[in-house]
Image: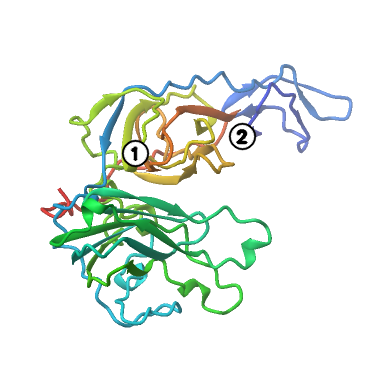
């Protein structure tokens, strides 16, 4: 009788088999047995448990700053114009304003960038950004490259979870030096968290995501808007849910085939204060003992008062979002197959910070979640990027 199975510790084996069965193997190895008084076969020695697993340290990090979209000179001429006047959403379009809802322009997942061009007046003292994002979504803004601030949705209470609309309006003061006449660029990044569910049959899943309205205090300048989000065709291997609209995502910074040789070497943990996005990449090789099924996670640890978020990519796959000052999840599973055994792995972290506190990453380390001897063999997923080279003068 040939048996396969797993053991998490050294274990006894007893086999009840038809008469005539006298020879047993376990995972291809012969097991010496004796016959019990009841006729079962008893292994004369315990089956071995898993061998110890050693996890590599995550070192040799490289770093690059992002969000060039916030700079006034960024070329957005290749972005779609946000100038529609009707929407497929159930969210009303504000009178006298264009549709700014991301879904109406084909951007359904991940971050969305907006750039509004206008001629300024000294009377414009503040700008109000209305947005719809889902719980813990956020909006951050720059005017002519100067950070105006960040606003985010709250952590819901149990009572709010069923009634909150997850819409808000953030008002940012315009510095006096940015109120003059001439051309101005308002750059806005919105991070939606998810679309609503439609459990009540009220088309809640059609609620807008992204900006919904923009107004100024003291003046009413006319804005010409352009919008950019995650492409539904950028990654033909991993699919549209994997990639959002960050500059690094649009240009493949999360993919294992991307070359980061020009990035700056850096050490973690970090404690930098900035508004916007920064990327960190490293590579490591995981070598489990033969015949051991090891479950591995990535654990991020930092002071909980620091307000920043991390999107985690392993070999190009988006494995989740870590919110340092909210939690509670601090360990993310790195699924076998996506986590390559006996081969290089590329880990990329996209850090989004609101500028109010120092931002990490803090300590980033691999964590052993469990082991078993035996296990089903897992094939490493191919390292093919599946990413179309969409870079051009508007993204470089």
Viewer-nearest residue: 367 or 185? 185
Distance, label 2 to label 1, CA atoms, is 54 Å
Res. 274 mark? 1
Q: Regarding mark 2 in the picture, which secondary structure is present there?
A: loop
Name the residue rendered at 33%, 65% in the picture.
107
First in sequence, mark 2 or 1: give its number: 2
At 40% from the left edge and 24% from the top edge, which residue is drawn? Answer: 58
Q: How many marks?
A: 2
Q: Residues within 10 Å of mark 1 (few under 14, many from 20)?
A: some
Out of 253 and 361, give the one closest to the viewer. Answer: 361
Secondary structure at numbered mark 1: loop
292 sits left or right of 58 in the view: right
Disc 2: which residue = 4
**x and y percent of residue 228 in the render?**
26, 61
Q: Tell me residue 292's x, y (percent).
A: 54, 27
Residue at point 72% right, 32% down? 21
């Amino acid at each position: 009788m040939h048996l396969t199975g797993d053991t998490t510790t050294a274990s006894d084996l007893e086999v009840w088999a038809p008469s005539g069965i006298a020879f047993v193997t376990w995972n291809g190895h012969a097991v010496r047995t004796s016959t019990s008084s009841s006729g079962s076969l008893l292994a004369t020695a315990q089956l071995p448990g898993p061998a110890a697993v050693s996890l590599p340290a995550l070192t040799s990090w490289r770093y690059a700053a992002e969000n060039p979209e916030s700079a006034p000179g960024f070329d957005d001429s290749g972005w779609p114009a946000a100038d529609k006047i009707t929407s497929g959403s159930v969210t009303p379009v504000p009178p006298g304003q264009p549709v700014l809802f991301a879904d109406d322009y084909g951007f359904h997942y991940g971050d969305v960038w907006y750039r509004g061009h206008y001629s300024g007046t000294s009377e414009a003292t503040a700008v109000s950004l209305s947005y719809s994002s889902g719980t813990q979504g956020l909006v951050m803004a720059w005017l002519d490259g100067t950070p105006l601030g960040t606003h985010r949705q709250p952590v819901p209470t149990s009572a709010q979870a069923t009634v909150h609309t997850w819409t808000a309006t953030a008002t940012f003061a315009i510095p006096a030096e940015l109120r003059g006449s001439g051309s101005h660029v308002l750059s806005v990044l919105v991070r939606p968290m998810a679309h609503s569910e439609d459990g009540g049959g009220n088309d809640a899943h059609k609620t807008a995501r992204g900006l919904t309205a923009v107004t100024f205090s003291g003046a009413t300048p006319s804005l010409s808007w352009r919008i950019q989000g995650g492409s539904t065709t950028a990654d033909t291997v991993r699919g549209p849910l994997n990639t959002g609209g960050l500059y690094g995502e649009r240009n493949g910074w999360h993919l294992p085939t991307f070359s980061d040789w020009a990035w700056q070497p850096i050490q973690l943990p970090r404690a930098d204060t900035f508004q916007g996005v920064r990327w960190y990449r490293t590579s490591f090789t995981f070598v489990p003992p033969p015949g051991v099924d090891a479950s591995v996670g990535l654990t991020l640890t930092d002071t909980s008062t620091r307000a920043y978020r991390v999107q985690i990519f392993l070999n190009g796959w988006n494995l989740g979002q870590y919110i340092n000052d909210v939690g509670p999840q601090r360990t993310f599973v790195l699924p076998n197959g996506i986590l390559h055994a006996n081969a290089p792995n590329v880990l990329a972290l996209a850090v989004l910070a609101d500028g109010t506190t120092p931002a990490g990453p803090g300590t980033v380390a691999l964590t052993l979640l469990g082991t078993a001897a035996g296990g089903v063999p897992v094939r490493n997923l191919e390292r093919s990027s599946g990413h179309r080279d969409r870079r051009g003068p508007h993204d470089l």
